[in-house]
Image: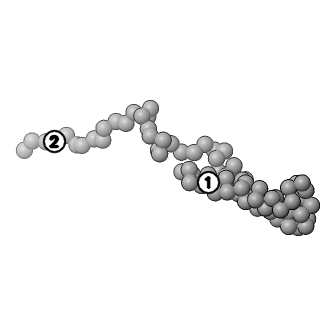
Amino acid sequence: MARTKPRTKPARDEGTRSNEDVPNPVWFKPLMFGFMLLGLVWIIVFYVSQGTLPVPALGSWNILVGFGIAFVGFLMTTRWR
């Protein structure tokens, strides 16, 4: 009886990896959570200080700034691998 060679997977060249296979850099996750927490802290500080902090000139627009910062963090979650 004839023996056959075992199947081997074709060798992949590491230089041809697609962007979907590449993991995120080490700084990505802390920055993502940092944006979300910074936005939350911004809104909490605005409410606790009764509108005098973090930027008094913005007034109620501080809420939008806080949500915008947190939204950047949530957008980053779509790129997290």
**Does residue 10 lie above or below 58 as drawn?**
above
Which quadrant holds the N terminus?
top left
Res. 2 image quadrant: top left
Relative placement, left or right, of 74 versus 48 is left
Looking at the image, residue 6 lies above or below residue 44:
above
Q: How is the image coloured?
A: one colour
- Mark 1 nearby-residue class (10 Å; few <14, some 14–19, many ≥20): few
Q: Can residue 76 be seen in this view?
A: yes
Number of residue marks: 2
Q: Say few, some or many: other residues with alpha carbon within 10 Å of mark 2 (under 14 / 14 to 19 / 20 or more).
A: few
Determine which residue is flagged by label 1: 75
Instruction: State the residue in front, 36 or 12.
Output: 36
- Residue drawn at (24%, 43%), measured in percent from left and top? 7
Residue 51 lies, in percent from the top left, at: 89, 63
Q: Position of residue 16 (x, y in %)?
A: 42, 34
Question: Where residue 4 is drawn, which disc sits there?
Answer: 2
For badge 2, the amino acid type reads Thr
- Residue 41 seen: no
- Is label 1 in a helix, a strand or a loop? helix
